[in-house]
Each structure stands twice: as structure tokens, then as C-alpha cells.
Image: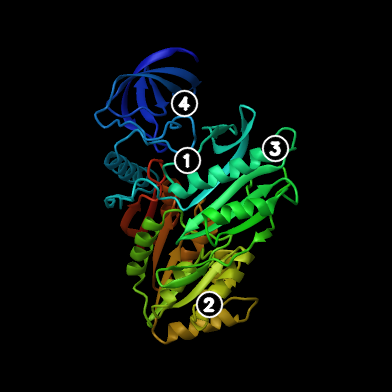
Amino acid sequence: MQPNQTIELNIIDLGMEGEGIAKYEGYTFFVPYALPGEKVKAKITHLKKGKNLGYATLKEVVEPSPFRVKPLCNRFGRCGGCTMMHLDYQKQLEYKKKNVQAVLRKNAGCVLEVNDVVPSVPYAYRNKAQLPFGMVNGKVAVGFYGTGTHKVVSSTKCFLHGEWLEKLIAIVLDFANENALSVYDEETKKGLLRHVVARYVGGKMVITIVINGTSLPKVDELADKLEREFSGMALYLSPNMRDTNVIMGDRLIPVRPTAQSIEVMGVKVDVNPFSFFQVNDYIRERLYNRVIEMVAPSENTIVIDAYAGVGLMGAIMAKQGAYVFNIEIVKEATRDSVKLYELNGVADKATNICGDASVELKKLVEGTDCGTLSPQAQKFRQLVASGKKVKIVLDPPRKGISKGVADTLNALSKVLPFELIYVSCNPATLSRDIANLTAFTPTEITPYDMFPHTSHVECVVCLTRR
């Protein structure tokens, strides 16, 4: 075998990235867009001979799976947004459950049965878009990067978003082309337009144009056009003149800074370009509800949210009587959390701490702060002494929790009884972290389909002391 050779494969499984898996002449091959039960012709792109792994591109489906469906989107396979739109939605859920179960057993020795995946609405579920600008056939275009590239695949709509995105794209592209605006080039570092970023949640629209500069010609004209389509929208510019893959710049230039406020599960939230929300409102509500059921917040509950962000989940529980300690390493998010609790009249039910979770958890629970009790630790001890139960919520980014956080939680379990609720967006790091949390054992694992038609899945895990 060698690269560029075409071989015939029988696909036996789906991988963690949604690619088909086959065995051939002692090698395990990964073939994107191939499905289990199919016979396919595939072209070898790369061989790792020391590991007996092969990678190939799908050339022809000789015998299709009965669960193969025609994708709604004509960009599927070119755009890097979706990887599983060719698979029946119910089967997507089944494979996601299977893969979560497999990675937990392999990496963490977890034999607990994983619950069925909580399904989503399969289309028009995303409330946020981040679209790079590019040039296609001499005109300004927006779209998504092709798989494994930084080449823009032009798109005028996306089935994962509602009609609002199609309308937004049309207005922005008309404006850019009518005014002959330049597009940022990653090689030359020249050109003005970099990304259009938009969030449409709770009927509120916040739009940001990311630019390689400090101004946008005729921006008021663009604002007027957007306002006619999205009444009450907010528009910002975000200068980003760095050579970076980070989309947003560090600051915002308000163009139409219309205040945007929504309500999430009884909590009023201000929406701005830097706000974090789960991209799927439908699943977010179901996931949050399950976490809240596990915590059972009341006047007798202390909640430590160790990766709090702006403190939204904690605010929901504070409204239900719990006292919340929010720990967050990003200063801006901690400031927003303080404002959020004040806005909702629950500032007296929360302590907001800015710092690393592994350090701040230890300080909070053990009270070790340069040999003295910090005010936060004093408050925590007072609440524990009153008989309140402690629940710790972990909702880390994709990289999961650090070994330091796991070690801290293991040590704290010896001096304080508490349950852990872990919200994960990456089964691989989840399995690693469960293996490191040696003082705890999972008692419930439920996946949530936050991202239909992709390989990604969220999980909510309840862990109790061994």
C-alpha cells in the first residue's frame, strides 16, 4: 500500500470525529463521510506505518448504508461545519452514546451504563455564527473554513442556524461589495474585513464586524440596513490587527450599542459581543435543568461553581435559595458575574472569586490564605457550620480540568462531604479527568446533543465520594 492508491474497504464503525473506520491488510483506516455497513472505494492519503494507521478520502460508496441520508446542505463535505449530516439523526444519537461509553471505559475504566443521548431540534439550533470573510470569484464572500484549511467555502445560508443568518449574510455582503471593501489576507496581513460575528438569542441580535483596522467606511449606512431587518439590533466593530487565529479583538467600538437583555430560566442577562452562552438554547435549558435537579438548590445548599464564567448557572440556583461561590480565572467574566447578581437582586447570595480553581478551591474550603482565613473562607465555614450541604459544579472548557484541580478535589473530599456535578463538552478530557478524580465514582452519565450533525457531544456526570 502507498499514498494515492485506491482501495476497497468495508466500514465497521464510526470514530470519535464521525469518520468511518475500516480494517485492511493489518491497518486501521479512517475515512471521513463513510458509514458503518458500507462498502466504499477510498484513496489513501497518509499511512502511519509504525502505528498501522491509515487515512483515506471517500471516492465512491459501492454499497450504501440504509441509514445514509441526503444532506440538506449542498456545502456538506466541503464546509468544515458538519461531519454527520449524511447520517440519520437517530443513528447519530446512538453512535454518540456508543462513543462516550467506549472512551470512558477505555480511559477511565468506567463500567457505568451511559444514558441515552438527550436529542435536540436537529436544525436551526445555533444562536451564534462566526463567519470569516474571503474572496470568491473576485467578490467578497463569507462562509466557513473548509475542513483542515483556512480557505473560505462561500455560504449564503446554514441549516444549523435560523433564517436570521441568511438575511444577515445578504446585507453584509451587499454592503461589502457595493463599497469595494477589502478582505484580510493571512499571508500579506493586509485587507480590512476579517469576520462577521453575530448572536441571535431571545429575539435579540448583537452583530460585530471584526476588522484589521480601527474604522469601517460608511458604517452608519450598514447600521441602517441592519436596523431595517433586525429592529433594535446592536452593532459593534472589533479591531483585531494581530497575526492570530483568535477571532475577536480586545476591544469594541460601539456603532449602535443598543442595550440587549434577555431572560434565561428566570435570570435577566445582558447580551454583548463578549457574552458566553451555550449555542443551542433548546439543549442548554434541558442540560441546566438536569444540573439543577442534581444540585437541588435551596436555602440549605452551598454551590461552588469552579468554572463559573459570568455565573449564569449559579444565578439560576441563587434565585432558588442556594448560596453560590463562583470561581473564574477571567477577570472580565468575574466583573460581569458581579453585575449579573446585582441585576437579579441576588448579590447577597453569592461570592465571586477571580483566580485559578485549584488554588481558590483549596483556599475556600481549607481556609489557607497566607496562614489566615480569607473573608471568602470565613463565609464558607460559617455556612457549612449552619448545616448546609455542599455541591461542586465543574463546567470547564474543552481541555477539561487540570491535574491540580483533580488533586485538590480528591484532597478536599477527605475533609468535606460533597457531590460533584461535571458538565463536559469533550468526552476524551472527561474520561481523563474521571480517571484522575480517584476519590469519586460516577453515578450518572447523560450525554446531550448540543451540536447535531457534528461529532461533538456534551455530558452531565454526577460523581460521589467512593
175 left or right of 204 in image: right
Q: Can residue 48 be seen in this view?
A: no
**Who's the residue at 40% across and 65% down the image?**
420
Identify the image quadrant of the N terminus. Answer: top left
Residue bearing the label numbered 4? 51
> Would you name the residue on which mark 3 appears?
180
Give the Cα distance between marks 1 and 3.
22 Å
- Between residue 272 and residue 102, name the one nearer to us: 272
Q: Earlier in the sequence, mark 3 or mark 4?
A: 4
Foreground mark, 1 or 4, reads 1
First-in-chain label (2 vs 1): 1
| Between 404 and 315, the one nearer to me in the picture | 315
Q: In which quarter of the image is the C terminus?
A: bottom left
The residue wearing badge 1 is 157
Q: How far apart are marks 2 and 1 (CA)?
A: 36 Å
**Secondary structure found at label 4:** loop
Amino acid marked by disc 4: Lys
Say whether residue 211 is left or right of residue 130.
right
- Quarter residue 96 falls in: top left
Alpha carbon separation for disc pair 1 and 4? 41 Å
Q: Residue at x 49, y 14 (%)?
A: 4
Disc 4 residue crowd, few under 14, some 14–19, many 20+, Cα 10 Å: few
